[in-house]
Structures are given as structure tokens and as C-alpha cells.
Image: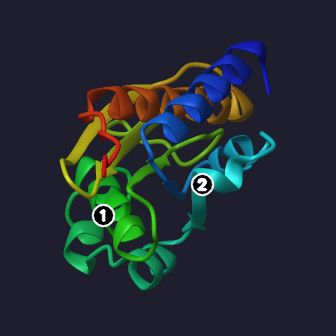
Amino acid sequence: MNKEQQQLLQQLAVLAVERQQVIATAESCTAGMIAAALTELSGSSAWFDRGFVTYSNDAKQQMLGVTEETLQGPGAVSAATVAQMAQGALARSSATMAVSVSGVAGPGGGSEQKPVGTVWMAWASRDYGHRTRHFLFAGDRADVRSQTVTEAVRGLIDCILSEPEVSPIRH
């Protein structure tokens, strides 16, 4: 984990606790690296619920409810797939928000339409829907996966900051 990731994770931890957010992950190309990064911090059990590693299409369908139509149409590396992955992670967890990723980390597997480095991410909240984003990362497999972790955490921070603050209940 690099210094930028450590700083982002510290920020995420503080915000998640302050805003009472609990996170789940749904990962394909990173195969659990985001969940591993989030749980590097002591006390992360206060704001991290679970992670789904759904590398195969069957796993995406069985564990997260991604539809056959989505996988056959836009494909596993698409906005539609990561949106369904994030929504599936929320539906199958106690989390209040989720991040999902699917991509082509390389060195093989790329195409003209989806070259190596192509990654789609989605962030979803129980109350405020989801957003997706496309990235084209440079570098080798390790670089693509590391950049994916960084942007996933950055996106979680952005999502928490865009959620309305929960006011404490006063009696």
C-alpha cells in the first residue's frame, strides 16, 4: 500500500465513522484487494461489513444477482455490470454503501473496445442510488490494480461527502 492510499484510507475511516456509513465491496479485477486495503486499518470492523470477490461471470450472477442479459449484452466490464454488482452487494449485506469494480487488468484479455487498463467502477448507497465511472489506467497488471484500489477509495470518500450528514437523535 502506498502513502496516498494510506492517507485516503485514514480519511475514509474517519468519515465513515462520523457519518455512520458501513461499506461493502464487490470486486472482480482486484480480487479482494479493496477489501484487504480497507481492513488494513485497526477498527475497520466499525465501518466495513463484507467483501464479495466475483471474478467469474457465474459468481457475479450467483453472489450479486448480475443478470445474464447484462453479461451477454454490455459485458462483464461495463457500467451496467458494476451498477448491478454494487446494488447486489447492498442487497446482500448490512452495508449502507458499496463499491464495485470490474476491468481488464492485463496483460492479456484486452480488446479494441476494452483495452488493458479499462476499469468500470460503481458506488451505491441505500438512500441515494448509484453512480458509475470509467477509467483507463496505464501500466502493468499490478499498476492497474493499485490504481483501481486508489480510485475506489477516493470514490467512497466522495460518496460519503455527498451524503447528507446524519443528525444525532436528541431526546
Residue at left 56%, top 19%? Answer: 138
Q: Position of residue 140 (x, y in %)?
A: 69, 27
The relative height of residue 66 versus residue 162 in the rendered view (above or below) is below
Q: Is residue 128 left or right of residue 56?
A: left
Q: Are marks 1 and 2 in contact (CB under 8 Å)?
A: no
Residue at left 42%, top 30%? Answer: 155
Q: Secondary structure at mark 1?
A: helix
Q: Position of residue 73 (x, y in %)?
A: 20, 64
Mark 1 or mark 2: whose residue is earlier in sequence: 2
The answer to which quarter of the image holds residue 2 is: top right
The answer to which quarter of the image holds residue 107 is: top right
In this view of the protein, which residue sits in the foreground, 101 or 4? 4
The relative height of residue 81 versus residue 148 in the rendered view (above or below) is below
Query: Which residue, given by chain and number where applicable, does mark 2 sit on?
Result: 48
Dot 1 amino acid type: Gln
Residue 9 - label: none
Query: Which residue, given by chain and number where applicable, does mark 1 sit on?
Result: 87
